[in-house]
Image: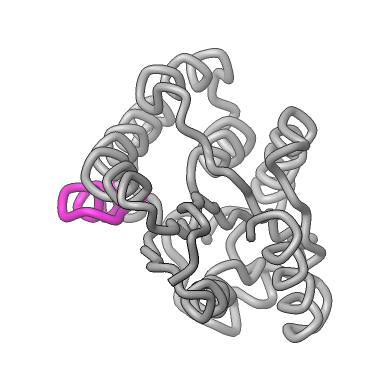
Amino acid sequence: MSSTPGRFISFEGIDGAGKSSHIESAAAWVRDRGQTVVVTREPGGTRLAEQLRGLVLGEAMDPLTETLLVFAARRDHLQVVIEPALARGDWVLCDRFTDATFAYQGGGRGFDLTVLDRLEDWVQQGRQPDLTVWFDLPPPVAAERRAAARAPDRFERQDEAFFTRVRDGYARRCMQAPHRFARIDSEHPREAVWQSIRELLETRAW
């Protein structure tokens, strides 16, 4: 068993960027090194948060309601899953975290960033990922991948301009926290992207 302490790593990017397809490979990489891994997602990760996820992805609502539901789900997720896992020394790999809220609600919806800052402080009490892997992909390429993969949810039906604003939101968060973010060019072939992730885990996480 490795003595390496737990890590909190988030995987971010616009829909279709490929983050979800690599998170299990990253989990296997960590397990091979003797660590216990919790793979989870946002919104979601708990019974309550998954119920809220269904509302956020499926029901029409204004940006404030949407934002409050996302942060309510995050609060439960932190208390029930993330914080206990980190306290045990487990690694937590999370498919989206707060950067997604700043990108989607802040960038895509144009919601007030100062309100997001305050909610982030209240809900997370300083908790941030140790490393955020940002899968960056041009919105037109992401749209092609989504169309070939699945039926769209309420967010995935948004137009290219929306996803351009989301991508800009991620870029803004990356500039604000360069010590935490690592940008991956996910337009490359899958194996090349995984090679970049593996190198990142070896140098920044392990």
* Figure check: 188 above or below 96: below
Q: Nearer the viewer, residue 155 or 10?
A: 10
Residue at 54% over, 25% down = 111
Q: Is residue 113 magenta?
A: no
Tell me where residue 36 appears, x and y as whole percent. 38, 68
Q: Is residue 44 magenta?
A: yes
Which residue lies at the image location 58% right of the left edge and 62% below the top edge? 15
Residue positioned most to the left: 47
Depth check, front residue: 73 or 128: 128
Estimate the x, y position of residue 80 in percent, counting from the top left: 21, 45
Residue 19 left/right relative to 196: left
Q: Main secondary structure of the magenta part?
A: helix
The image quarter in which residue 160 lies: bottom right
Residue 110 position in % (x across, y down): 60, 28
Tell me which residue sits at (52%, 35%) in the image.
128
In this picture, residue 113 sits left or right of residue 81:
right
Q: Colour scheme used in the picture?
A: one colour
| Front in this rendered view, residue 136 or 160 | 136
What span is in magenta? 43-55
Taking the spot 31% from the left edge, 53% from the top edge, the residue there is 44
Q: Is residue 188 left or right of residue 71?
A: right
Q: Image quadrant of residue 75? A: top left
- Quarter of the image with the N terminus is bottom left
* Residue 139 picture location, percent across and down: 74, 60
The quarter of the picture where the C terminus appears is bottom right
